[in-house]
């Protein structure tokens, strides 16, 4: 072991978080501490073979710098966007990764690394990361809802990711919160889904629709070709006191509360954890805390009193690292279950 290097708890586990832009690789130890980390472009429109083949050499180099070897890695976990077939270990047709369609990633990654591979949805991996060492670590069940361009979700109950019979068990962004004829259209083409209201895309759509009746809003200055309106612009305007922006944040909290109320009655988890870029500053800002309070208030208004009394809703802690940490954590969980048989 090189001098002044941190000592980690063996065995180690490799997490692979596949995204349409980048692939994040991280090795964590048995306690969830990150040993090494890197990322590189995913080349989503090209064959994934060269990408998969470079994973082991990259990790071997990083581990050697820490005084460890690839032999110390017991298992690998990988999370990818859907749609997917988790049981067969294959991506199906992720819309932003055309070169990876119908790719047997579990088999290929297992061959390239020589390690057992656990495969999961990327949102499920992020949820497991928060469950293992993040905001959900003290709970036996939790739901992570990620608010970004879309609305992602992962459901963890007693170390198990709820994936469903067709690998779509946690597509909570597509639960229906509006059945009116005027319901907004989701990115999937269906009407009234949570994602159409609480995602960054939904916030922008609602903002654009409201601007014509709010000429005084500073958001009109952001609604230009040279400066497209964004969820971040809404957040910044709300933080500065813009009335329309504040109303949009309030409405987003209410829409999300409706979705959480539905999930609370179905799953009854101990906690809901909110992640993703659309957190309005999170718990570090008055706006973020007000948003969280709004989510909790609307959820409590709609659910059984016994659920409302015990309701826990917090912001996520791991940020962009949740995916690779959770993928590694799921590999660790499977490795330990297999070892105990």
Image (cartoon, rainbow, N blue to C red):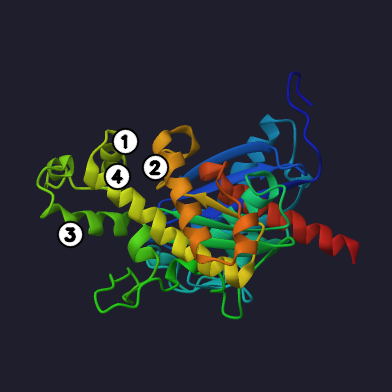
Q: Label 2 to label 3, Cα distance in Å?
A: 20 Å
Q: Label 4 to label 1, Cα distance in Å?
A: 8 Å
Residue occupying the point 32% across, 75% down: 191
Residue picked out by circle 4: 246
Residues at discs 2 and 4 in contact (Cβ within 8 Å)? no
Residues at discs 3 and 1 in contact (Cβ within 8 Å)? no
* Residue 64 makes an appearance in the image: yes
User: Residue 301: x, y in percent?
Assistant: 49, 61
Give whichever of discs 2 and 4 has the lower sequence position: 4
Q: Nearer the viewer, mark 3 or mark 4?
A: 4
Residue 239's label in the rendered image is 1
Residue picked out by circle 2: 280
Residue 209's label in the rendered image is 3
Residue situated in front as seen by the camera: 288 or 169: 288
91 relative to 208, above or below:
below
Where disc 3 sits, the SS reads helix
Q: Nearer the viewer, mark 2 or mark 4?
A: 4
Residue occupying the point 87% across, 60% down: 339
Residue occupying the point 70% across, 52% down: 329
User: Residue 244: x, y in percent?
Assistant: 22, 47
The N terminus sits in image quarter: top right
Crowd class of label 1 (few under 14; some 14 to 19; many from 20; radius 10 Å)? some
Where disc 1 sits, the SS reads helix
Residues at discs 2 and 1 in contact (Cβ within 8 Å)? yes
Residue situated in front as seen by the camera: 271 or 223: 271
Give whichever of discs 2 and 1 has the lower sequence position: 1
Q: Label 2 to label 1, Cα distance in Å?
A: 8 Å
Give whichever of discs 2 and 3 has the lower sequence position: 3
């Amino acid at each position: 072991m090189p001098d002044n290097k941190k000592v980690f708890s063996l065995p180690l586990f490799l997490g692979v978080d596949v995204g349409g832009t980048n692939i994040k690789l991280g090795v964590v130890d048995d306690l969830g501490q990150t040993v090494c980390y890197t990322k590189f472009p995913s080349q989503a429109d090209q064959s994934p073979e060269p990408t998969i083949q470079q994973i082991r050499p990259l990790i071997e180099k990083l581990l050697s710098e820490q005084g460890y070897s690839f032999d110390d890695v017991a298992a690998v976990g990988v999370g990818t966007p859907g749609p997917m077939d988790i049981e067969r270990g294959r991506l199906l047709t992720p819309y932003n990764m055309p070169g990876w369609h119908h790719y047997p990633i579990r088999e290929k990654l297992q061959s390239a690394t020589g390690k057992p591979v656990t495969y999961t949805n990327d949102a499920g991996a992020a949820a497991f990361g928060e469950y293992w060492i993040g905001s959900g670590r003290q709970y036996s069940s939790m739901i992570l809802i990620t608010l970004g361009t879309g609305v992602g979700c992962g459901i963890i109950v007693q170390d198990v990711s709820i994936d469903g019979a067709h690998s779509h068990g946690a597509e909570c962004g597509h639960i229906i919160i509006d059945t009116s004829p005027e319901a907004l259209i989701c990115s999937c083409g269906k009407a009234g889904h949570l994602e159409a209201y609480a995602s960054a895309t939904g916030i922008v759509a609602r903002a654009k629709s409201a601007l014509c009746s709010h000429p005084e809003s500073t958001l009109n200055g952001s609604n230009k070709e040279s400066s497209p309106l964004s969820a971040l612009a809404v957040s910044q305007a709300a933080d500065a006191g813009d009335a329309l922006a504040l109303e949009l944040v309030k409405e987003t909290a209410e829409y999300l509360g409706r979705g959480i109320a539905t999930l609370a009655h179905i799953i009854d988890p101990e906690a809901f954890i909110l992640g993703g870029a659309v957190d309005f500053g999170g718990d570090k800002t008055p706006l973020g805390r007000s948003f969280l309070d709004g989510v909790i208030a609307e959820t409590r208004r709609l659910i059984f009193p016994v659920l409302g009394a015990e309701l826990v809703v917090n912001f996520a802690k791991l940020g962009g690292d949740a995916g690779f940490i959770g993928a590694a954590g799921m590999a660790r969980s499977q490795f330990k279950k297999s070892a105990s048989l």
